[in-house]
Image (tube, helix red, strand yellow):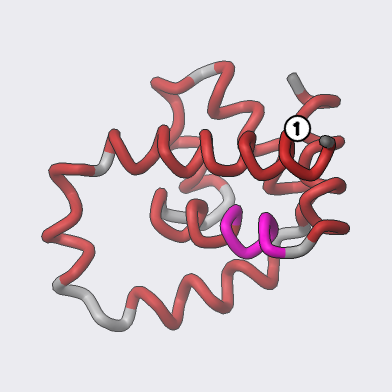
Amino acid sequence: MKKISLVIAAATLVWMFGCKNQSNDTASNTTPSNGNTSVAQQSSLSPEELGELGAKIKKNPGDAQKLLSEKGLTEQQFEQAVRKVAENPDQSKRYAEAYKKAS
């Protein structure tokens, strides 16, 4: 049950950013080098840091860009990092605990 909740939480964050970025999809598709940057960035943030960041964004959605840029991320990079964490049960648990603690 906890795994399902973690996946739902991660999917909700991805969905939240996905809906917000509908108008930016074409711009992100024209920069192929963006994918390489996101892979490097994913490894530099721990699941705990991503969880804390996700909670901050949920508390202050208007400051999402500022919060992400402070960590050197774009919305797409954050989404990819959360998806990567959601693939691993241990990392998902760590993300969820940090998210709950920061909420």
Q: Quadrant of residue 6?
A: top right
Identify the residue shown where x is 85% and y is 46%: 93
Residue 40 appears at what percent x and percent y? 57, 78
Q: Quadrant of residue 4?
A: top right
Identify the residue shown where x is 51% and y is 53%: 78
Q: Amino acid at mark 1?
A: Tyr
Q: Is residue 3 left or right of residue 38?
A: right
Magenta segment, which residues?
82-87
Q: Is residue 34 left or right of residue 14?
A: left
- Name, please, the residue furthest toward the front: 1
Q: Is residue 37 magenta?
A: no
Numbered circles on residues, count: 1
Q: Is residue 16 above or below residue 90?
A: above
Q: Nearer the viewer, residue 74 or 72?
A: 74
Q: Is residue 58 above or below residue 74?
A: above
Q: Is residue 92 left or right of residue 81?
A: right
Residue 83 appears at what percent x and percent y? 57, 58
* Circle 1 crowding by C-alpha within 10 Å: few under 14, some 14–19, many from 20: many
Q: Is residue 83 magenta?
A: yes
Residue at mark 1: 99
Label 1 sits on a secondary structure element that is: helix
Q: In which quadrant is the N terminus drawn?
A: top right
User: What is the chief secondary structure element of the magenta stretch?
Assistant: helix
Q: Nearer the viewer, residue 89 or 79?
A: 89
Identify the residue shown where x is 74% and y is 19%: 103
Q: Nearer the viewer, residue 70 or 95?
A: 95
Identify the residue shown where x is 62% and y is 27%: 56
Residue 29 appears at what percent x and percent y? 19, 69
